[in-house]
Image (tube, coloured by chain):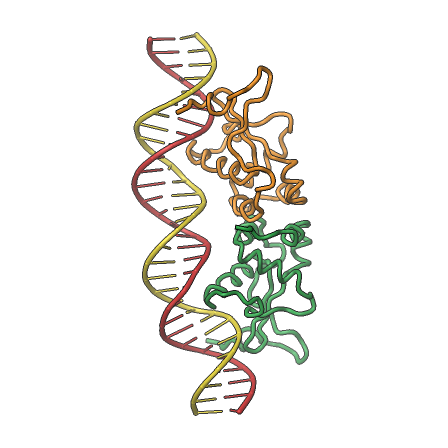
Chain colours: A green, B orange, C yellow, D red
Amino acid sequence: MHTLAQTYMLGEAPGELPGRLPEPAAENIRLERVMGVLAEPLRLTIVQRLLLASEDFDQTCGWFGFDRPKSTLTHHFKALREAGIITQRQYGLERRSRVRLEDLNARFPGLVDLVLNWTPDAT
Amino acid sequence: MHTLAQTYMLGEAPGELPGRLPEPAAENIRLERVMGVLAEPLRLTIVQRLLLASEDFDQTCGWFGFDRPKSTLTHHFKALREAGIITQRQYGLERRSRVRLEDLNARFPGLVDLVLNWTPDAT
DNA sequence: GTAGTTGTACGAATTGAGTCGAACTTACCA
DNA sequence: TGGTAAGTTCGACTCAATTCGTACAACTAC
């Protein structure tokens, strides 16, 4: 058994970004999977806010300020990552997320704009 | 209680198209709902084939030739209609479906192209 | 060391979706 | 009038997803 650091930061040269957590390769991202994951308002919100935030800085789980248990958030971030929508990197204790903009735009042009233009339900 | 004809063909002048079955108004179509409904491969297939078929002719449920029980197909077409993705009209016994192209393009530009470019999973 | 922070893992309860059979309604036609 | 075809409705089953509490692991700072 590896520690988190051993598992995710193997072979890392000084100055490089921490390795990405397990995620599908760009060519394996499936539209139906992405749609299913984005059907959840909370996850749609996460992706939209990541897109609106500066692209230069990945965001931590807690940055969003959701009033939900941590285990619930872990669940949703994992779903987003395993669908190929976001990347997560381990920075010490924190796990920072970023939208896989280039991969999504290459594979599903127009999808990101749909998320950006989305407005949460008023009800 | 009304019969089908009474319910869906009320106030219909000769030569007019049969009335639409209950569906959300264009402004009430929700992205998260549409995404959730299109997350199902069978439904994605239905919409894609409707888009590829001639726009001049609505298609019946049976036209697709799916090897599934009729009750299953009813379920999926209803889901598509209630999400605002397709319109269904009653022609005698048959119920013909058509994609709400203008509404979808107005509300979610680019979405239809995503469906058109979709390729079913090889596995 | 120890406390506090960030996040995971596991398990349980609940909810919802998909699938299907069977019975039914409606329309059409011979 | 009797049969057939298109599609609905209902109920039941199964399976997956959501939510959350609790316990745990890793890192930081004191």
On the image, the x and y values in percent for residue B28 come to: 57, 42
Q: Is residue B110 shown above or below A102? A: above
Task: Decide if residue B91 is on the left or right side of residue A113.
Answer: left
Q: Residue B21 versus residue B57: which sits nearer the camera?
A: B21
Residue A53 or residue A28, whichever sits in front: A53
Residue located at (55% from left, 70% from top)? A62
The residue shown at (68%, 49%) is A110
Q: Position of residue B58 (x, y in %)?
A: 58, 27
Which quarter of the picture shows residue B14?
A: top right
B52 sits left or right of B11 in the view:
right
Q: Is residue A8 above or below residue A112?
A: below
Q: Position of residue A85 (x, y in %)?
A: 59, 58
Residue sitting at 62 percent across and 35 percent down?
Answer: B51
Quadrant assignment for the N terminus of chain B: top left
Depicted C15 relative to depicted B101: above or below:
below
Label count reads: 0
At x 53%, y 46%, the residue is B33
Q: Residue C27: image x %, image y %?
A: 46, 17
